[in-house]
Amino acid sequence: MQQKSFLQRNWYFFTPIVIIIIPLIMAVNSMVNWGYSFSESMNALMHFGSTDTRYSIGFSELGFKTIKPGMDGRTVYSLIKNPFEGPATDTPWKFSLPQGDAKYYHERTLVFEKDSNGVPRVKSIISRFHTPEMK
């Protein structure tokens, strides 16, 4: 009779490690891909099955990450194209919205302010995991 290996005899010792490692890998993935803090990554992970985001045509996370405060509207448009809401009005440019009746989504919004020449420039960048409690 062949003797069982250490792993075969003690597999149950590794179960807690796996239960911790998989969520940790998922949290690190959201920190790297979306630029979230650890707590925001954990919040996104807790709502994993109820998150659904739709993005505007031409949007890319990479393009959004290159936007900096002070950029003008034309430069932003050349990087990430049409927002769902914004360019025709003075409202923030929203590049993501919840899909269907989803309550949780990855919010990507730019707030603009006109400079002294009337050129809209990026005032602030909103890149966060949106929950119903947020306004």
Image (spheres, rainbow, N blue to C red):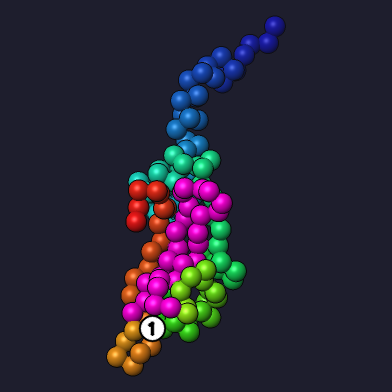
Q: Which residue is mark 1?
A: 120
Q: Which image quarter: residue 3?
A: top right
Badge 1: few (under 14), some or many (20 or more) residues near its Cα, within 10 Å?
A: some
Judged from this view, the residue extending furthest toward the right is 1
Image position of 101 (left or right of 27): right
Q: Residue at x 38, y 83 (%)?
A: 120
Magenta residue check for 112: yes
Q: Residue at x 51, y 42 (%)?
A: 50
Q: Residue at x 46, y 41 (%)?
A: 47
Magenta residue check for 93: yes
For the residue pair 8 and 120, the one nearer the viewer reads as: 120
Q: Residue at x 53, y 40 (%)?
A: 49
Q: Is residue 69 visible?
A: no
Number of numbered tags placed on the structure image: 1
> Vertical placement of 97 versus 17: above or below?
below
Q: Which residues are magenta?
A: 89-113
Residue 70: give x, y in percent of width and height: 35, 80
> Vertical placement of 86 versus 5: above or below?
below
Image position of 97 (left or right of 131): right
Residue 81: give x, y in percent of width and height: 55, 75
